[in-house]
Amino acid sequence: MKTDNHIFVGATSARIRFASSSVIAAMLAMGLPVLAQAEDGAAALAPADTGLAAADDGSREAGDIVVTAERRETSIQRTPLAVTAVDAETQRERGVVALRDLVGIAPGLEAPAGPMRGTESTQQLYIRGIGTASPAYYGAVGLYLDDVYIPRMYGNGGIDFPDVERIEILRGPQGTLYGQNTSAGAIKIVSRKPSEETSGWVRGAYGTFDTVELAGYLTGPLADGLSASLAASTRRNDGYVYNETLGRNVRRVNISQYSAKLRYNPDDRLDAVLSINFTRDRSDNGDIIAEGYRDSGPRRTYGNIDPRNSNDALGINLNVSYALNDHLTLRSITAGRGFDYYGPWDFDGRPEDLSGFLLFVNQRQFSQELQLIGDAGRLSYIVGGLFFHEDYEASRPSWFNRNYSGLHSHTDTSNVGLYAQVGYQATDALKLVLGARLHHEWQTFSDYGFATDASFKELSRTWSVSDLKYDNTAFTPRIALEYQATPDIFAYVSVTRGSKSGGYNPLAGALVVAEYPVGPEKVTAYEGGLKTRLLDRRLTFNVAAFYNDFRDYQASVQSPIIDGRPVIGNVVVNAGRAHTYGLEIETIAHLTDTFTLNGNVAILRTKFDKFINPTGNANTDYTGKELTGAPRHSFGVQANWQLPLPTEAELRFNAGLRYVEKSWTDQANTIPTSNQTYVDAAISYTDPTGHWLLSVRGKNLFDKQYVHSRTFDAIANISTVSYAPPRTILGEVRYSF
């Protein structure tokens, strides 16, 4: 089968630049009015290296983990929501280079593997049993890079930017401060700002499957008040699944990521950072193994499609923070992003054209957000507004039982939102928080299908729709109570509304699907939490309980009937009502000065309360079933032992255990994954100067071959499966200066 991508891509390599010079000019034009005010001079509202309003509750203490989950700096122990922070050191020790590596670190977070998910190219995310099965739609878990929204799952898997300072995982709807498409939660990637002190590091690593990793980071001053940073990383390996048809290994990784920053910080009032980041991904897409076909197995497949994808993503953003006075800060976040993506997807795992497609996507986006963050006596507040626009174009030639067809769609989406959150300190211990967001979204959609052959040349159009309109207005309020019982005991309760966008299916392969818009998904979330530090602060024990009530839940239905006509493939529909509830626990125990034990547990229950069967197919009524991607139990534990040596060198050991109970991969609850237990470990040595670090890290040490996903297409009579990655060992050398 011919899978060359030149047929549809054409000049896409040039389009990724998407007039970058004009985007930069526009951002500078928006930022310069704020920069011009820097000459006035005033006392600082917040530390210069944050560009944010300081914590309004005096919650920051020495040794605290500080997060910006509420758009301002607060101690994680006094933040009234379930949030996990993963700092740069933890990322290095645990080998966090992709979103899926966060599983087991944060309770309730799942990153399913399998077709069109779980690779560097595409990673679906679920929090508390809620996610999005189809990457064609906006995800239920919002992803943010330096407060810039990344709406699509294509190309989101790799997060190996060397300047990442921390990752915050926010669990539960974040509709007020982060807007739509956070009905399950949000993941914030926060990168390090350039420093006026010269520093940096370089690292190299080699491991199993000829894995090679290189990375480096450099920051320092350019002039008075002006500093810069550069960061680069590349990861490659030879893959671990042998493809008999292609005669080589697949599941290869080949991804490089770069970022550059320029920071202007002339005084304590102004902080402006211009950032550019670029990702080049040529990794393989997920492996599909045909069950029962010849000698197919966990590390052997027969697919006839070259799985190498091509994804180039570029982002440019300007973040400006200006202290208007001692109690009020203005922030501007201006960003332009885009990607050009080509992905071949094989869904049969055989040397035949039974099921699969090639996907070409061109995406461009622009956003502008303004925030006022301040305090006035007992009041603390944030008021903001956001404009977002996305242009999304997709082409998808496909095959099914050696029949070939294709589609080409264009989606133009815009939304505006206004939001505010106010906290009132009623007493020294009790605080009331009220928030709300009002946003409006509108979408224009065009799509057409075409006849093709095995060469995927467009022969003739078979159907089309043009300039279909969709719009939606949503109001997402929040109310919370916080209670600081003692300096080390903090409790909160909250009620929050969230939503997830609807609209047209950008990969609609039939007229009846193209004409069928999906309504927004709505959720009301109830949460209570307790955050404590006990035993002279040697033990941190946090617990959160939640109940989520979903209306118009967006579910993926296999081969439904719409308006009396059968449709082959997955279609997203508003299934009706569902609920999830559960309990999450996070602990950090400093058993000695050199030995620490971290742990987390998630208990989850899910259920469709009403599946209204919108397609008219009696076989798609799943009332009473559990939601997909929602394991009932999961936990993670990590032991860390730091051994000082007489020469002032340091030896560190860490070992981890991750467990995920089986979950369902289909709405009918007939196809489960496996119960999965993984053991990881690492050892590192830091020399007496503190400059050199040597480490060895292993993942899945017992080489477990668990089933990550399993699918069955009754129409094509195809059963396929994907397995967990094998054991990997990586040795690393790092030099810091």
Image: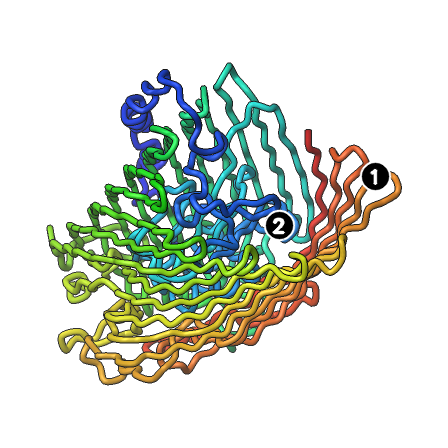
Q: Residues within 10 Å of mark 2 (few under 14, many from 20)?
A: few
Task: State the count of labels.
Answer: 2
Q: Earlier in the sequence, mark 1 or mark 2?
A: 2
* Mark identifier at residue 714: none
Horizontal arrangement in the rendering, residue 639 relative to residue 299 (left or right): right
Q: Is residue 303 left or right of residue 173?
A: right
Residue shown at the point (28%, 42%) measured from the top left: 384
Report the front residue among 163 and 582.
582
| Picture residue at 31% right of the left edge, 72% below the top | 549
Q: Nearer the viewer, residue 333 or 588?
A: 588
Where, by quadrant of the figure, is residue 725 drawn?
bottom right
At 35% from the left edge and 34% from the top edge, which residue is drawn?
A: 329
Of 555 and 640, the residue lying toward us: 640
Q: Give above or below for 639 relative to 733.
A: below
Q: Quadrant of residue 650?
A: top right
Residue type at mark 2 is Thr
Measured as percent of width and height from the top left, residue 245 is found at: 52, 61
Measure how far apart labels 1 and 2 are at the Cα level. Answer: 22 Å
- Nearer the camera: disc 1 or disc 2: 1
Horizontal arrangement in the rendering, residue 632 relative to residue 389 (left or right): right
Quarter placement of the N terminus: bottom left
- Specify the quadrant of the image occupied by residue 488: bottom right
Residue occupied by mark 1: 648
Q: Position of residue 62 (x, y in %)?
A: 60, 44
Question: Vertically, is 459 above or below 691?
Answer: below
Label 1 neighbour load within 10 Å: few <14, some 14-19, many 20+: few
- Amino acid type, mark 1: Glu
- The residue identified by callout 2 is 90
Image coordinates of residue 302 in percent, x first then y, are 51, 65
